[in-house]
Image: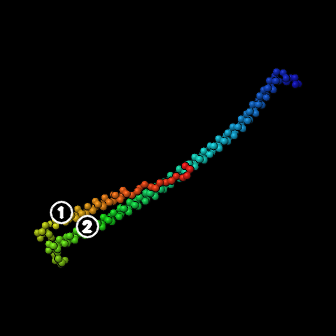
């Protein structure tokens, strides 16, 4: 029987069987190798995805923090500007009241000097009717014109102060630090 297998067809069959067995063994080794490689690549992929998710979360957190800081800065700047406006408005009104009071005193003094003043029970004759000039002329302006010019000068002065104070407000937010490891 062994002689029958030792003919050229038997030897070819045995050789083919050994070759197929060897190929199967090599294939098994290769399959194991590629399974290990595949597991390694899958692990790298998962690590990369986790790192990407962490990066996205960090960027979203930083963006939310920056938006919050921007809102806080906006509220701070608006409060500073409102305080400047209120302070300037109060200064303006106080200066106008003082200028009007001074003009009123000048008018009363001028009337007293010209003999038009007196007790309230005596009717006052207008300056035009008494023949005196229309108001005291000083620097080429009548008293009402001088008061108007003073009011406008005060208004411009306070406006300039307001603009300078508003320009001095720091509207830049404080720098936001990024999380460690980025």
Residue 133 placement, left or right of 90? left
Mark 2 = which residue?
99
Mark 1 = which residue?
139
Mark 2 Cα within 10 Å, few/some/many (few <14, many 20+)?
some
- Callout 1 secondary element: loop
Disc 1 and disc 2: Cα gap in Å?
17 Å
- Does the image show residue 164? yes
Query: In terms of sequence position, does the residue under pointer 1 or pointer 2 come before the other?
Result: 2
Say if 133 sits above or below 169 in the image. Answer: below
Mark nearest the camera among 1 and 2 is: 1
User: Seen from this angle, which residue lies furthest left?
Assistant: 131
Give the percent coordinates (x, y) of residue 101. 25, 70
Give the percent coordinates (x, y) of residue 43. 65, 44
The residue located at (72%, 38%) in the rendering is 32
Residue 81 placement, left or right of 59? left
User: Seen from this angle, which residue lies furthest top?
Assistant: 8
- Callout 2 secondary element: helix
The residue located at (74%, 33%) in the rendering is 26
- Does the image show residue 125? no
Give the percent coordinates (x, y) of residue 112. 17, 74
Mark 1 Cα within 10 Å, few/some/many (few <14, many 20+)?
few
Which of the 4 image quarters holds residue 74?
Answer: bottom left
Residue 137 placement, left or right of 18? left
Callout 1 touching callout 2 (CB < 8 Å): no
The residue located at (32%, 60%) in the rendering is 161
Residue 13 placement, left or right of 124? right
The residue located at (88%, 24%) in the rendering is 1
Q: Which mark is residue 152?
A: none
The residue closer to the viewer here, 35 or 138, is: 138
Say if 166 sits above or below 182 in the image. Answer: below
Which of the 4 image quarters holds residue 98?
Answer: bottom left
């Amino acid at each position: 029987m062994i002689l029958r297998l030792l003919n050229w067809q038997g030897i070819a069959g045995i050789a083919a069987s050994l070759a197929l067995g060897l190929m199967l063994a090599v294939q098994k080794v290769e399959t194991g190798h590629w399974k290990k490689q595949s597991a390694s690549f899958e692990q790298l992929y998962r690590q990369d995805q986790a790192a990407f998710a962490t990066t996205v979360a960090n960027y979203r957190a930083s963006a939310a923090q920056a938006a919050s800081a921007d809102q806080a800065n906006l509220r701070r700047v608006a409060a500073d500007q409102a305080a400047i406006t209120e302070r300037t408005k109060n200064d303006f009104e106080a200066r106008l009241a003082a200028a009007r009071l001074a003009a009123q005193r000048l008018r009363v003094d001028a009337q007293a000097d010209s003999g038009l003043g007196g007790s309230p029970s005596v009717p006052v004759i207008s300056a035009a009717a008494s023949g005196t000039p229309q108001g005291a002329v000083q620097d080429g302006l009548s008293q009402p014109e001088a008061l108007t010019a003073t009011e406008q000068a005060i208004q411009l002065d306070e406006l300039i102060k307001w603009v300078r104070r508003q320009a001095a407000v720091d509207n830049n937010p404080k720098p936001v630090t990024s999380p460690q490891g980025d």
